[in-house]
Image (cartoon, rainbow, N blue to C red):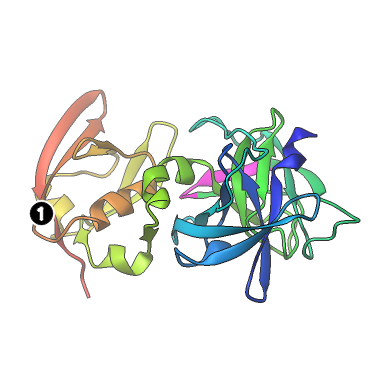
Amino acid sequence: SKSKTAVVAVQSGGGAGSGVIVSKDGLVLTAGHVSGRPGRNVTIVLPDGRKVTAVTMGGSEISDSGMCKIKEEGEWPFVPMADKGETKVGDWCFALGHPGGFMEKRGIVTRIGRVINKRDATLRTDCRLLGGDSGGPLFNLDGEVIGIHSRIAMADDANFHAPIESYIEHWDLFQEGKMISRKDLQKGGFLGVGSEETDEGLKILRVVRGSAADKGGILVDDIVTAIDGEPIDSREELSIVVGSKAAGDEVVVDLQRGDKELTISLELGKRPE
């Protein structure tokens, strides 16, 4: 199948994982823990066993997404990515990768399963994965990439993937070689809410007393739609937007409260020690 032509092995140091080419000029999506820090050289093994060098780019520690770019010029076999929000719980999908590492004689291994859960910058399926699959692609039945294998479980139904949305949302940032790290975000501003992803949007479950959210008038059950004009549809997006600002920064929060749309301006606080 066409899907297999773009699946690669990613080798660096002693470690090996998988990846998938998503552009003609050789952009490879993989897991953040496979690509590691930006600016490193890694070896990409194509399905026919040919090896080329790629340089690692940016990624996110929150969703475990990573990216690298093949250095050699050329037109590479690539596969399309699914649109944002296309994948739903219950969808059939198939996982490709190099379980146990690259083996030319055996080739790429296909596992079929279903999407069990999708939230908080992770996608969960019951596609059976093994070590070496990390960074490999998860496809929908139209042959579009919907996720990248991240955490591989002993239990069949607890395999986690970075959803394609976490690449699409930070595409330019990753190409510039920026890493989104939990530690850096914790140095940023503090809003003071607990939230969950729902079909309506990002719903507030709790508000920390005395926090910026509390003082600004955000209430439980409000749906946050945007901050400073930046659409918010996941907890990952919320923590990145808030964490990239400083304590004391003024932000504008767009909310849906029942059938009313509200805009609140508030000053971000400092994260409690």
**Quarter of the figure with the C terminus:** bottom left
* Residue that extends furthest to the top in the rendered view of this protein: 259
Residue 118 lies in magenta, yes or no? yes
Please name the predominant secondary structure of the magenta segment in the image.
strand
Left or right of 115 in this view: 108 = right
Quarter where residue 115 is shown: top right
**Quarter of the figure with the N terminus:** top right
Left or right of 181 in this view: 166 = right
> Is residue 64 in sight in this rendering?
no
Tell me residue 239's x, y (percent): 32, 54
Tell me residue 69's x, y (percent): 53, 51
Total residue callouts:
1
Tell me residue 145's x, y (percent): 62, 38
Residue 87 lies in magenta, yes or no? no
* Residue that extends furthest to the right in the rendered view of this protein: 105
Depth check, front residue: 259 or 247: 247
What's the magenta region? 115-121
> Is residue 169 in sight in this rendering?
yes
Quarter where residue 77 is shown: top right
Depth check, front residue: 186 or 191: 186
Q: Which residue bears the numbered disc 1?
A: 249
- Which element carries disc 1, helix, strand or loop? loop
